[in-house]
Image (tube, rainbow, N blue to C red):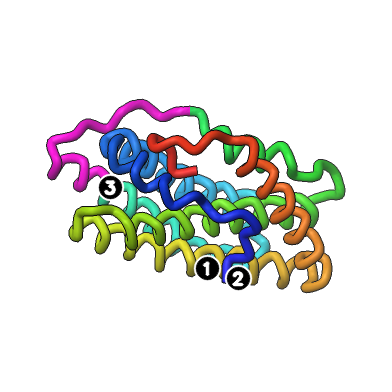
């Protein structure tokens, strides 16, 4: 469904499980950045009525996810660490085509966000299936379902605002590029991406 060309090695779950405080910290900041990204899109494109209407509740949802992860850290007597540079996301941003006006900028941002949500969904799925603790399986399943919906929304908005053919063609380019990123990056248990 997600179209990702290179799946995550399932052994990534073992790495994440060994670094639970680190993976939860990274997850918390991913949720915070997702909320901020939606706010930024609304600020940049207030004239896109459907975008504003659809993303406004996602801001609240993503911030709620941030709080859920904080609660999970607290419940486990773990601490929120410092935010770290997200090499995966930075590489995706570097792939965005510059120029071409606001419409092109919107398409690039929507597809970047869709890909981040798709990879997050895939990683949450792995955690929901393979992490040893049942409670965490349920915890991550909820996030997987949510991220799948966000991925779908960003793709739908890209098609609506850029046209289906343009969005599909560029999406394939993003998927190909993302596979090269996944080949280059060493899997780390302290990072969601």
* Cα gap from disc 2 to disc 3, whole angstroms: 29 Å
Task: Answer whether residue 60 is magenta in the image.
Answer: no
Rendered residue at 69%/44% (across/down): 180
Query: Residue 183, how many percent across, how many down?
Result: 64, 41
Classify mark 1: helix, strand or loop: helix
**Can you say which quadrant of the picture contains the N terminus?**
bottom right
Task: Answer whether residue 72 is magenta in the image.
Answer: yes
Along the line of sight, the residue nearer the viewer: 146 or 15: 15
* Cα gap from disc 2 to disc 1, whole angstroms: 6 Å
Decide if residue 192 is on the left or right side of residue 53. Answer: left
Task: Tell me which numbered mark, 2 or 3, is placed earlier along the sequence.
Answer: 2
Label ID, residue 54: 1
Decide if residue 103 is on the left or right side of residue 150. Answer: right
Rendered residue at 80%/44% (across/down): 97
Are the residues flagged by discs 3 and 1 in contact, CB closer than 8 Å?
no
The number of numbered badges drawn on the structure is 3
Rendered residue at 48%/69% (across/down): 149
Along the line of sight, the residue nearer the viewer: 52 or 161: 161
Decide if residue 90 is on the left or right side of residue 73. Answer: right
Label ID, residue 159: none
Query: Residue 92, how many percent across, how many down?
Result: 66, 42
Are the residues flagged by discs 2 and 1 in contact, CB closer than 8 Å?
yes
Q: Specify the segment rendered in magenta.
A: 69-84
For label 2, count other residues whose C-alpha is less than 10 Å away and answer few (under 14), some (14-19) or many (20+).
few
Q: Which residue is mark 3?
A: 69
Query: Residue 26, how many percent across, how many down?
Result: 39, 38
Rendered residue at 58%/66% (across/down): 2
Task: Tell me which numbered mark, 3 or 1, is placed earlier along the sequence.
Answer: 1
Label ID, residue 50: 2
């Amino acid at each position: 469904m997600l179209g990702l060309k290179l799946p995550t090695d399932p052994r990534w779950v073992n790495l994440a499980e060994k670094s639970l405080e680190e993976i939860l910290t990274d997850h918390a900041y991913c949720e915070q950045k997702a909320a901020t990204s939606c706010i930024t899109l609304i600020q940049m494109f207030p004239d896109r009525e459907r975008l504003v209407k659809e993303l406004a509740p996602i801001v609240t949802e993503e911030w709620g996810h941030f709080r859920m992860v904080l609660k999970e850290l607290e419940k486990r007597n773990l601490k929120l660490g410092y935010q770290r540079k997200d090499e995966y996301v930075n590489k995706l941003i570097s792939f965005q085509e510059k120029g071409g006006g606001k419409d092109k900028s919107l398409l690039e941002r929507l597809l970047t966000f869709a890909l981040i949500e798709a990879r997050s969904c895939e990683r949450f799925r792995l955690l929901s299936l393979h992490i040893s603790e049942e409670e965490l399986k349920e915890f991550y399943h909820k996030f997987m379902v949510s991220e799948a919906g966000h991925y779908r929304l960003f793709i739908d908005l890209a098609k609506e605002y850029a046209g289906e053919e343009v969005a599909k063609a560029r999406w394939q380019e993003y998927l190909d590029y993302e596979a090269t990123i996944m080949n280059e990056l060493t899997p780390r248990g302290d990072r969601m991406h």
